[in-house]
Image (spheres, grey):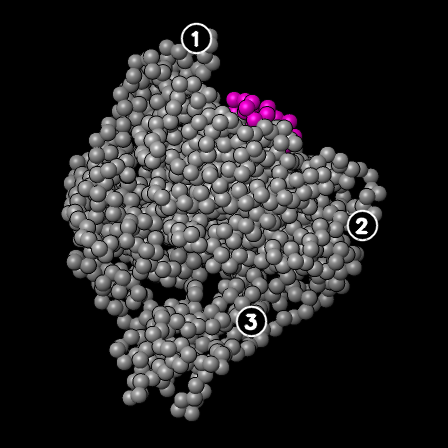
Amino acid sequence: MNIIHNTARINRRHLLKGAGVAMALPLLDCMVPVLRAKEEVVRPRRSIFISLPDGVHVRAWQILEAGPKYSLSPSLAPLEKHRARITPISGLFHTSGGHSPQSFLTGGRSGQGRFGISIDQVMVNAIDGQTRFPSLEIGGDSHAFNADGIQLPTDNSPSRIFERFFTEPAGGIARQRRSLERRGSVLDAVLDDARSFGTQLGQQDRGRLDDYLNSVREVEIRVERSNQWLDKPRPKVAPDVATRLNRNPSAAGGLAEYMRLMYDIIVLAFQTDVTRVVSFSTGQENNGSVSPEIGITVGRHGLSHKQNEELVRSDTYNVELFSGFLDRLVEVRDASGPLIDTTMALFGSHMSNGSSHVTANLPFVLAGGTELGLRHGSHIDFNKIGKPEFSYALDKERSRSEKFDGICRVPVNSRAPHSNLLLTMAQKMGAQIDRFNNSTGTIAEVV
Amino acid sequence: MRKVLIVRKRMKHFLTVAALLLGAFFASHRAHAGDAKGVESFFKTHCMRCHDGKDKGNDFRLDTLKANFADEQLAERWSEVLLRINSGEMPPKKEPRPTATEAAAVVEWIATEIKKGETARAAARGPVTLYRLSRQEYANTVLDLLGVHLNPDQPGVFVEDPRWHGFENTGFMLRLSPAHVEKFVAAAETVAGFAVPEKPNPPAKTRAGGSKQLKIERNGKSRYLVYPGQGQSIYRDLPSGTAVKVRIQLSGLKSADGKAPRLVIEPYINREVVTPEDQPITLEFVSIAEKLTWRQLGETKLDKKNPKPFAEDGSLREPILLIDWIEVETPYLTEEQADRQAELVPKDGDNLDDVRKSLHRFIERAWRRPVDTAETDRFMKVIASERKAGESFRSAYRSAVSAVLASKDFLYLREGSIKERRDRIDDWELASRLSYMLWGSMPDDALFEAARSGELRKPESLRKQVARMIADPKIARFTEAFPHQWLELHKVGMFPPDRKTYPEYDLSLERSMIQETSEFFAEVFNNNLALREFILSDWTVIDPRLAAYYGLPKPNGSDFAKVKLRPEDHRGGLLRQAAILSLTSDGTRHRPIHRGVWIAEVLYGVTIPPPPPNVEPLNLLRPDAKKSTLRMELDAHATNASCAACHRKIDPLGFAFEHYDAIGRWRDTDRSSAALGEPISKKGKEPAFPINAQGELADGRKFDGAEALQKLMVQDIDRLAEAFVEKLATYALRRPMTVDDTAELKRIAVACRESDYRLKTLIETFVYSNLMQKR
């Protein structure tokens, strides 16, 4: 990436002088999205990615029959009422090894050692600034990586997210504009100084300086955008809703209270079009995610090494909470219809069996988004697609089997990287890409 | 073991696999001879039939693949080769199969070369190198520059820095995204806000008491009586950037049965307080925590509604604290810090010459180098434009200060010049290297002065400065930060121990454990003891909590103190400290393999290749897990040929510590692998197994138990010293060492051999070496 030596870049002070009449200014590149947002008639497309840390109890999760006539597995049973809206997917894989939550949205390391851009950020680029916040990253491990492969930070405080999204900052528009201006002149000086540094730097150092310059430049654009957004009031949230959502969950409420609060804030954010892309890591890898309210006091990492009934209970409980989230997406409507029709929700984990740290036959459920062209109702089983004579060696009790362990370790179908699923979703969000990481194609069965 | 421990092999030429097959490459590199035969014949036998370009359908050419691992793209191709071989995908099933050992040898060769290439790639330097401050260094720097107390760990203030082998300050890891820059700009605004307030903000003292319910009258004095488990808030919602000085006057009385009260003010105070009732003590500390509470540790058995801590005969049922007062002073500044803030802003904002002079002086200190007029002008412009926008002078000046703090020369340490290519750093850069190494922060005025005079690099002057820096209290930042990063202490408690299995484990024990290790390091450093002490010692530094935990006699007083160890105490050296023993555990069980990897990587400085992806796991859930121990299962694992190649080099190092559990407690017997990590069952007896802490190093030396291994390691002290110098250099120079540094690193170690590798001597020898002044 090069240092941006664009002398014609907008001078923010010109822009700011016209504060209040910003819309009358000539069209500047970086403002276009904001203006376009006003004219938009197409329903917004939305995506959310929800991950479980440390894999799942794969045997209890596994659906045994492929196609439309499947029975939900014990762990997925809470999704029965949403059958028509979901597609469970088996047999996808990545090859970046266990405990790499970074793989969840990047599809795994590309080449040697590094994670590239994550699919949610590909979507953000496609949406191009049509919302006040480009995306929301919540929870334990950030799954979001920008185009430079840098991990974006997460927020896991519901009240902080609520404040950021829905509360007008104190002091009114004039004061906010002044403080953005201040930040603007600080950034101007900082950029001028950095640009003066010449272009004779070595490759490596340029990399570090470019990181800095590109980031400062991006922050400058964000300041400009914030300034644009100042004239658009934040969505009004009814006082009772605000009281219910603008808080932090009590410790006594356990996992459920935290998850429901987050899910409700996300639903509200989608409904009011504050953001359209969310990645939600429900717990930190290797650490925590306990649910004392159902008697689970050991974190999922500990449970994953035991692969016991408690892990099944934790999985099922998380699926139940996810099912509740789908309920809300069905109930809550934007101007044109239920959110679920335009919202794709992916639920799953970046590992299958967390005890043996294996990453084939990953657990995934894709839901919603029919208006974006998704079709649901079947269990898509890449194990069977790769090998028609394939069957799961699981008995009724789903006790341990060597063969089943094997398919979670080595993919049955080597042409089913989970990048294919991510690519499929990105295309449905309107991203103009036909490859993503190691993808071999889209998933024809859902489109 | 010796074989793995050879890390560096020089690679001067970049040859293709084809040339490699000719043997030309290896013939000239004897160190490789052992590996060479295997690698060479492996490619010939198993790969070249299809990957030599003659097969039209196959465009993955190995015959033209250069063995230049310093080139990013080539290294990526090699890693693909590694992955294919490792996963068993290549060679394909129909081709002749390599043995597991053959495949492992090739995989290890590629992995080592890639790793070596990584450092070469990372360290490829142009005329100027930029090293970003870590967030801790940022906080230290704004404290020394402006007296602003940022708490780098406070959520939302900074993004956590990624580590490279434990080190937080490695340049190529510290990348920036817009989210980072937003935080740095916001932090700059916060810092400037405190340093240049609109109106002066003099510190104010207030007295926080306790609630009325705690108040009692005794012997004519009104005090707060606190029994176990009771506590209250001292303050909350402290804005980031402010410090508070807290003073507390109190007495502590033991209960009739001899229990002493323990005052806990996380994270600053956790100590027993025992004084006569009429001779209270005063404790004081400076806090930057967002909120602070005090309490007496423990739980009371008294009736909460009507406690009655005194029995009828006047004796105490439970230990109590008697608090006279708690004083809170905020915003707290030392005299020096207050002066810094006072001199920052010119008195007369309308006198532009004064303004320019003040700003210029500030930028030079902030950027740690002389600046020119054009540079200062950029920030004068900020003042002008802000004033034009109607801001007051102080407010406009504040924006200029923010801009200086958000600029690249503040956030990055810059070495080299674009005007002239030089391979040594200049005096200013040396001043920063010294201060960031030894103080984790910017140079002070004396160091700047030495740089300005051009004297700094003269040996005599350098020695004087270094001696002064080591004597300064700020050296504590080094003796805390360096062992923390070198020994990867951030991993302690990373997997919080299961509360059911390890009820005695809590955050305060965890803090004591970590502090033991850094106090131990400081003790070796301050007394210039031999490096050998890290491996094996007959002493350690513990507080009363750890004494109880280890079953050692209590040290005098309530603080950390040095204690003598006997063999039957089963402690000594870093290796048998609870922090080190537990940082490799997974929260429920100890992990011998991880312990082995830690010793190899951290102490021997060796790179252990990662296990192949999707490897057949150790079968932890097999039906007979009740009849075997983890050690037995690992031994079985190592009989598998494809695993054994690596594991026989790693595992024995960990097996030596089988007597220590996941949180570093001594144990006499082993448990079955099914029971390991579970709470000890109250019903029914659980079978006990004898502990097997025997092992054999790859070079054939045998041992039984930790101390025996430690004694063998002491024989390796030359190698350990070299590895230590490399770690020290990585920390000080903020980059991985490359083959080009090897000779100098070795020279430094060798120079200290005579003097027994004494720690301070090692560090000083490094500081005076060429490496310290090399770009």
What is the x, y in percent for residue B513?
A: 33, 58
- Viewer-proximal residue among A196 and B458: A196
Q: Which chain carries label 3?
A: B
Amino acid residing under circle 1? Asp
Residue lying at 42% horizontally and 54% vertically, measured from the top left = A292
Residue lying at 42% horizontally and 29% vertically, measured from the top left = A64
Q: Which residue lies furthest to the bottom in this view?
A: B220
Q: What stretch is highlighted in magenta?
A: A428-447
Residue B69 vertical position relative to residue A249 in the rendered view, above or below: above
Q: Which mark is residue A19?
A: 2
Secondary structure predominantly adopted by residues drawn in magenta: loop
Q: What element carries label 1?
A: loop
Query: Is residue A442 inside the magenta stretch?
Result: yes
Residue A89 vertical position relative to residue B394 in the rendered view, above or below: above
- The 10 Å Cα crowd at callout 1, few under 14, some 14 to 19, many 20 or more, is few
Side of A42 where B635 appears, left or right: left
What is the x, y in percent for residue B174?
A: 51, 43
Amino acid residing under circle 3? Thr
Q: For the N terminus of chain B, give its image quadrant.
A: top left
Pointer 3 and pointer 1 on the same chain: yes
| Total numbered labels placed on residues in the image | 3
Residue depth check, mark 3 versus mark 2: number of the one nearer the observer: 2
Q: Which chain carries label 1?
A: B
- The 10 Å Cα crowd at callout 2, few under 14, some 14 to 19, many 20 or more, is some
Label 3, label 2: how far apart the Cα atoms are: 39 Å
Q: Check disc 3 and report the residue beneath it.
A: B330
Label 3, label 1: how far apart the Cα atoms are: 77 Å
Side of B619 where B235 appears, left or right: right
